[in-house]
Each structure stands twice: as C-alpha cells, then as structure tokens.
C-alpha cells in the first residue's frame, strides 16, 4: 500500500547547499519524497512510500532521512492536525456538508483539539468517527494519520522535562 505523509525537520547545521542536501536525501533512499527547502533551517519532505503498514513506511522514511540529515530534529508529521476543510477533502465531501454532520452529531463527533478560527481535530479521530458512521474513508489515510498522531504525541512528550512530566501525570491521575 502507498502511504502519503510529510516529515518536517529543523536543521541545526544550516545547510546552504540545497543541491547537496537533496543529493544526500536521494542517495539515502528518499527518492520517493518531494523536498521543500524554502524556509532557512527547515526541511519538509512529502513522501509517497510503499510499505506493508503506515508504521513501517514512517520508520523507514525516518531512518533514511537520518542517514542524510543526521543533525535534523523532527518537529511534525503530517497528516495529523486538520480543519474541517482538510477532513472533508479526505472523505470527498464539502466542508459545509461535514460541518452539518459534525453539528448534528455534536455529542458523538470527536472534540476539537483547538476550538477557534479555525478549529482543529486530530485527523485520525475524525476519520475513525466517519468510518464508524458509514462514510467512505481511505484505509491508508486513516492508518497514516493514526501513526502521525502517535509520532507527534511522542515529539510533544520529549519536549517536557522529567519533573514537569511527573507533575502533569499526578494532575491527570
């Protein structure tokens, strides 16, 4: 199955030779990625990777990038955070239709992780709910968004100090 996802990195050693960076990525096995290097010190790679699972696709891509950009810090994995427009596109419906569905089913539709303008959801939560309620959801998209969410959660957790992590665990217990 082919999984489409994006890995976003912060580069600590700013590599001003973009051609050399792209060559290293290609040689390391990232020939199935479209690189984005427009922002100084940042790298985004959109992969279309074939694997037997989303986890395997992500793990192999992460290992390949590490070979080429050992100093890079993974900061985000997509698809994860999504607005109504993004979610609607993944299931082939209009944003307005999805808004009606979410409003009508407010008590069971997943809670937004950020309520505002725009509100944001974890894509995997919304897609799971839609699939459970009879809407057509691509299996690969659901699987990769679930794996991306897990990685983003790990990224956020690594940012917490050990002491603060214990404090938060005690508050949530």
Image (tube, helix red, strand yellow):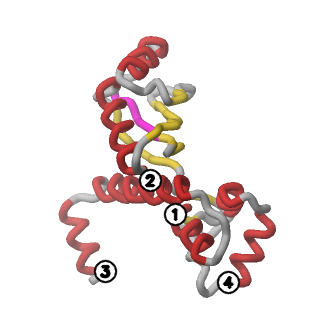
Residue at 19%, 65% in the rendered image: 163
- Please tell me which of labels 1 and 2 falls first in the chain: 1
x then y, percent, for residue 121: 57, 65
> Which residue bears the numbered disc 2?
148
- Please tell me which of labels 4 and 3 falls first in the chain: 4
Tell me the quarter of the picture where residue 158 sits: bottom left
State the CA–CA distance, disc 4 to disc 3. 28 Å
Tell me if residue 16 can be seen. Answer: no
Residue contact at pointers 1 and 2, CB within 8 angstroms: yes
Left-right relation of 13 to 165: right
Tell me if residue 52 can be seen. Answer: yes
State the CA–CA distance, disc 1 to disc 2. 9 Å
- Please tell me which of labels 2 and 4 falls first in the chain: 4
Using the image as rendered, state which of residue 51 and residue 64 is in the foreground. Answer: 51
Residue contact at pointers 3 and 2, CB within 8 angstroms: no
Span of residues in magenta = 7-12
Q: Which mark is residue 124?
A: 1
Crowd rating for badge 4 (residues with CA inside 10 Å; few <14, some 14–19, many 20+): few
> Which residue bears the numbered disc 4?
105
- Please tell me which of labels 3 and 1 falls first in the chain: 1
State the CA–CA distance, disc 3 to disc 2. 24 Å
Left-right relation of 120 to 11: right
Q: Is residue 111 above or below residue 17?
A: below
Of marks 4 and 3, the one in the foreground: 4
> Which residue bears the numbered disc 3?
172
């Amino acid at each position: 199955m082919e999984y489409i996802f994006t890995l976003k990195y912060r580069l600590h050693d700013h590599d001003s030779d973009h051609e050399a960076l792209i060559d290293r990525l290609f040689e390391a096995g990232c020939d199935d990625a479209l690189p984005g290097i427009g922002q100084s010190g940042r790298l985004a790679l959109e992969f279309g990777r074939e694997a037997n699972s989303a986890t395997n696709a992500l793990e192999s891509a992460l290992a390949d990038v590490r070979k080429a950009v050992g100093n890079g810090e993974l900061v985000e994995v997509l698809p994860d955070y999504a607005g109504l427009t993004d979610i609607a596109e993944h299931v082939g419906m209009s944003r307005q239709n999805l808004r009606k569905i979410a409003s009508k089913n407010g008590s069971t539709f997943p809670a937004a992780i950020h309520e505002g303008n725009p509100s944001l959801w974890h894509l995997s939560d919304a897609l799971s709910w839609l699939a459970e309620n009879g809407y057509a959801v691509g299996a690969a998209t659901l699987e990769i968004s679930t794996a991306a969410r897990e990685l983003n959660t790990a990224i956020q957790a690594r940012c917490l100090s050990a002491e603060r992590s214990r404090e938060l665990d005690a508050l949530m217990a």
